[in-house]
Image (cartoon, rainbow, N blue to C red):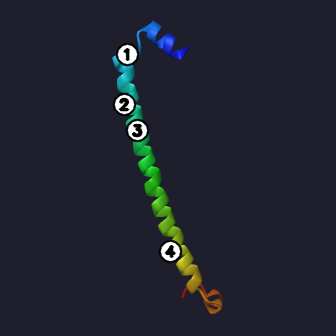
């Protein structure tokens, strides 16, 4: 049915095709940004876990100013 409607209306215009290209590029950019942020977050979590593992009970009793 959709094919019939698009064929009947003459298909997408040049402007619509251009918009589609721009939107696909934007989606790809956003997906890359999400991947970069996930990698950064994983690194931060690993550093946090490393730091938590090295904390001793004595470290918790020390004053904050030290």
Which residue is disc 2 drawn over? Answer: 21
Identify the image quadrant of residue 19: top left
Q: Nearer the viewer, mark 4 or mark 2?
A: 2
Residue at 41 percent across and 9 percent down: it is: 10
Q: Residue furthest bottom?
A: 58
Viewport quadrant of the N terminus: top right
Contact between marks 3 and 1 (CB within 8 A): the answer is no
Q: Residue at x 37, y 23 (%)?
A: 17
- Distance from Cα at disc 3 to Cα at disc 1: 20 Å
Q: Are marks 1 and 2 in contact (CB under 8 Å)?
A: no
Residue 62, position as x, y percentages in the image: 61, 90
The residue tagged 1 is 13
Using the numbered discs, state the Cα–Cα distance from disc 4 to disc 1 in whole angstroms: 51 Å
Say above or below: 19 vs 36: above
Q: Position of residue 21 (x, y in %)?
A: 36, 30
Residue placed under numbered mark 4 in the picture: 47
Residue 26 vertical placement versus 41 (above, below): above
Q: Label 3, on which residue?
A: 26
Label 3 Cα neighbours within 10 Å, binned few <14 / some 14-19 / many ≥20 = few
Point 35% across, 25% down: residue:
18
Q: CA distance from mark 1 to mark 2?
A: 13 Å
| Circle nearer the N terminus (3, 4) | 3
- Count the numbered circles shown: 4
Residue nearest the observer in this picture, 65 or 38: 38
């Amino acid at each position: 049915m959709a094919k019939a409607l698009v064929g009947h209306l003459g298909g997408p215009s040049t402007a619509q095709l251009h918009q589609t290209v721009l939107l696909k590029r934007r989606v790809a950019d956003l997906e890359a940004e999400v991947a970069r942020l996930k990698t950064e977050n994983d690194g931060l979590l690993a550093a946090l876990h490393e730091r938590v593992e090295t904390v001793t009970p004595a470290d918790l009793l020390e004053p904050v100013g030290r």
